Image (cartoon, coloured by chain):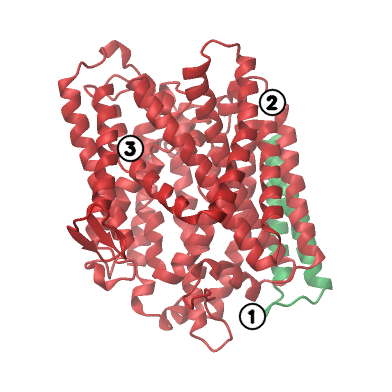
């Protein structure tokens, strides 16, 4: 069902962007983190969301 | 735990998407079958992910992390022997009867196969149980958010219930299933980084293992005797009680999960649903259990982290997950982690509500109250039942917050009712001589045997209420496994004996319901879409995992 892939992909692209941009701009840190958690997780979610959208697009074509 | 605006933004975005999915799906709902059974039209990758997501409630996620910290990687038994083999069994052997019988629910299968009283017994206990378990999980979530975020109990309970209510009453089962898929990905992407970070912090897998007693990082090595492992279980109780009776009883007969497979768009897809679901299920321990295990190792390092304590000074393992999130996730990911927790809660609750809905509407209302109404009437009943189910859950959540003992008691009773179920289905599906009287008597006797076992044995000061104590178990977990074993065996024997003494159904009435009288359609599909090869691949992967973490 390509509809669902669009919803899931869209959600994670948006959240990935929000979290990634937070990592780039805001200096939030957690007590025990050892990297820019927001940046890396944001990029991962962005990639996952894009793959979902690509799968939906490929199916719809 | 302090949240920044970005965390609230992510949480709100999730709510918007969940409601939008409900809204989009609504257009497809025109009959009661669309609403309650998805009209058997959902693609297999979606039903597979929904199959495990419906079971992946907040209590599961929080509880598995807690058990990881308490029992170590042994907790993975709840997945590797406590779920996957049963999922393979239901897909390969049982789904042809569930799907092929055209029953709309598991209780309805019991009516077709046995009789009305067996169905009514199963439908009523199931309906009551689902409402209670969704209420109890709502209570757990409200309590956690109150403790961690200082949100009001009422606000978090009502908000989450309202959102579940809106999307399930809009789109019914399809909406619940679609959202479960979104929730599944959210749970994985929200918790997997946490597992990676915590294990890395303790020095990788070997670093973590070196900070813990060996029993915490092995699954089978210490199971020869109950006294050697923190669960207090020995290998027979574990394999027979958890791996066979409890696990098959849940994954093969519980309508909550079976409903997802029955919504699939073909017999082949229905059979593959639990098989495909077994792959992610097998890997879930790395996301939900490993953080707990690593948290214990972390607390042995001088980093300022320790397992949270209860008011009485004992460890409060249920808070392990949220304290880890606070330690490793900055605002942003923290919002996503909390959203994932909220998602797990909602997927569990929506699963319960949609299953309750179908059983109430088709098995109790249509079966006993109003038999021959037009379909639009049942669609209306289904929608109303959604509201009632959510309201009852909220009520239960409040009841649980005031009368904890009643809840413990009810959960105990439900355990007794559930324990014998698998024997009934096994005989029903694979022995055409089994009769309705036999099934009904077996279920009652099995439940009684479960209660008697609990009443005559003691574990951690629990049980023993029948006066005499015949045995003392090293842990309540071991006691539960043995209660299940006795209940199942009693149900099996009583069903056999009573069936042989009563009149069986004519064979012509048992087509598509029993093994030997059911033609399993041969589908012309490539090998990787056939149940048997898929199941073999799962078994191979399962063996590798067990040896790896032996």
Q: Which residue is mark 2?
A: B28
Residue at x 66%, y 61% (from the top left corner): B338
Return the x and y of residue B71 as percentages of the image width and height. 39, 69
Query: Any idea which chain is the green one in this picture?
Result: A
Label 1 element class: loop
Residue at x 68%, y 50% (from the top left corner): A51
Query: Depth-wise, is mark 3 or mark 1 nearer the camera?
Result: 3
Furthest residue toward bottom: B302
The mark found on residue A32 in the picture is: 1
- Mark 1, chain letter? A
Cα gap from disc 2 to disc 1, whole angstroms = 48 Å
Furthest residue toward front: B467
Q: Residues within 10 Å of mark 3 (few under 14, many from 20)?
A: many
Chain B, colour shown: red
Query: Depth-wise, is mark 2 or mark 3 nearer the camera?
Result: 3
Q: Quadrant of residue B390?
A: top right
B192 lies left or right of B473: right
Q: Residues within 10 Å of mark 1 (few under 14, many from 20)?
A: some
Q: Quadrant of the C terminus of chain B?
A: bottom left
- Mark 2, chain letter? B
Label 3 element class: helix
Residue B92 or residue B507, whichever sits in front: B507
Q: Earlier in the sequence, mark 2 or mark 3?
A: 2
Residue B175 or residue B268, whichever sits in front: B175
Return the x and y of residue A21 as percentages of the image width and height. 81, 66
Q: Which residue is mark 3?
A: B421
Residue B141 or residue B395, whichever sits in front: B395
Label 2 element class: loop
Cα gap from disc 2 to disc 3, whole angstroms = 35 Å
B9 lies left or right of B102: right
- Mark 3, chain letter? B
Look at the image and tell me whether residue B520 can be seen: no
């Amino acid at each position: 069902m390509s509809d669902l892939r669009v919803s899931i992909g869209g959600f994670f692209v948006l959240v990935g962007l929000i979290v990634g941009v937070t990592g780039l701009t805001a200096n939030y840190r957690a007590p025990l983190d050892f990297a820019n958690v927001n940046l890396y997780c944001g990029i991962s979610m962005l990639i996952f969301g894009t793959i979902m959208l690509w799968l939906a697009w490929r199916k719809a074509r | 735990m302090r949240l920044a605006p970005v965390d609230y933004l992510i949480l709100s975005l999730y709510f918007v998407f969940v409601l939008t999915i409900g809204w989009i799906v609504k257009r497809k709902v025109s009959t009661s079958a669309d609403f309650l059974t998805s009209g058997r039209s959902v693609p297999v990758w979606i039903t597979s992910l929904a199959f495990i997501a419906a079971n992946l409630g907040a209590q599961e996620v929080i509880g598995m992390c807690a058990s990881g910290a308490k029992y170590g990687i042994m907790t993975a038994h709840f997945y590797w022997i406590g779920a996957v083999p049963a999922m393979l069994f239901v897909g390969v052997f049982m789904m042809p009867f569930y799907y092929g019988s055209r029953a709309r629910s598991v209780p309805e299968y019991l009516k077709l196969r046995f009789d009305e009283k067996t169905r009514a017994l199963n439908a009523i206990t199931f309906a009551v149980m689902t409402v209670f378990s969704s209420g109890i999980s709502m209570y757990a979530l409200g309590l956690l958010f109150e403790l961690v975020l200082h949100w009001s109990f009422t606000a978090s309970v009502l908000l989450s219930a309202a959102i579940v209510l809106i999307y399930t009453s809009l789109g019914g089962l399809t909406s619940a299933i679609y959202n479960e898929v979104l929730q599944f990905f959210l749970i994985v992407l929200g918790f997997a980084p946490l597992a990676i970070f915590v294990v890395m912090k303790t020095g990788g897998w070997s670093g973590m293992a070196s900070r813990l007693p060996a029993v915490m990082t092995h699954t089978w090595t210490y199971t020869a005797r109950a006294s050697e492992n923190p669960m207090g279980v020995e290998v027979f109780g574990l394999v027979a009680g958890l791996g066979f009776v409890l696990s098959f009883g849940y994954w093969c007969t519980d309508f909550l999960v079976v409903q997802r497979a029955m919504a699939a768009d073909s017999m082949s897809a229905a059979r593959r649903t639990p098989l495909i679901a077994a792959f992610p299920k097998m890997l879930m321990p790395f996301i939900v259990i490993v953080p707990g295990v690593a948290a214990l190792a972390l607390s042995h390092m001088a980093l300022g982290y320790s397992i949270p304590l209860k008011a009485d000074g004992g460890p409060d393992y249920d808070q392990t997950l949220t304290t880890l999130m606070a330690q490793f996730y900055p605002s942003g990911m923290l919002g996503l982690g909390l959203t994932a927790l909220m998602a797990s809660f909602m997927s569990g609750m929506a699963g319960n509500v949609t299953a309750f809905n179908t059983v109430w509407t088709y098995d109790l209302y249509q079966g006993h109250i109003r038999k021959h109404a037009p379909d639009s009437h049942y669609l209306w009943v289904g929608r109303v039942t959604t509201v009632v189910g959510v309201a009852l859950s909220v009520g239960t959540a409040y009841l649980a917050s005031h009368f904890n003992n009643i809840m413990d008691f009810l959960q105990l009773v439900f355990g007794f009712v559930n324990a014998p179920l698998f024997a009934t289905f096994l005989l029903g599906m694979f022995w055409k001589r089994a009769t309705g009287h036999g099934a009904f008597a077996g279920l009652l006797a099995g439940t009684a045997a479960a209660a008697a076992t609990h009443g005559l044995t003691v574990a951690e000061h629990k049980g023993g209420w029948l006066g005499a104590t015949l045995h003392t178990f090293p842990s309540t977990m071991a006691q539960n496994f043995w209660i299940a074993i006795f209940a199942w065996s009693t149900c099996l024997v009583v069903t056999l004996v009573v069936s042989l003494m009563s009149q069986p159904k004519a064979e012509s009435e048992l087509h598509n319901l029993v093994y030997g009288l059911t033609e399993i359609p041969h589908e012309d599909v490539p090998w990787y879409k056939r149940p048997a090869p898929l199941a073999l691949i799962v078994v191979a992967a399962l063996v590798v995992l067990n040896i790896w973490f032996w």
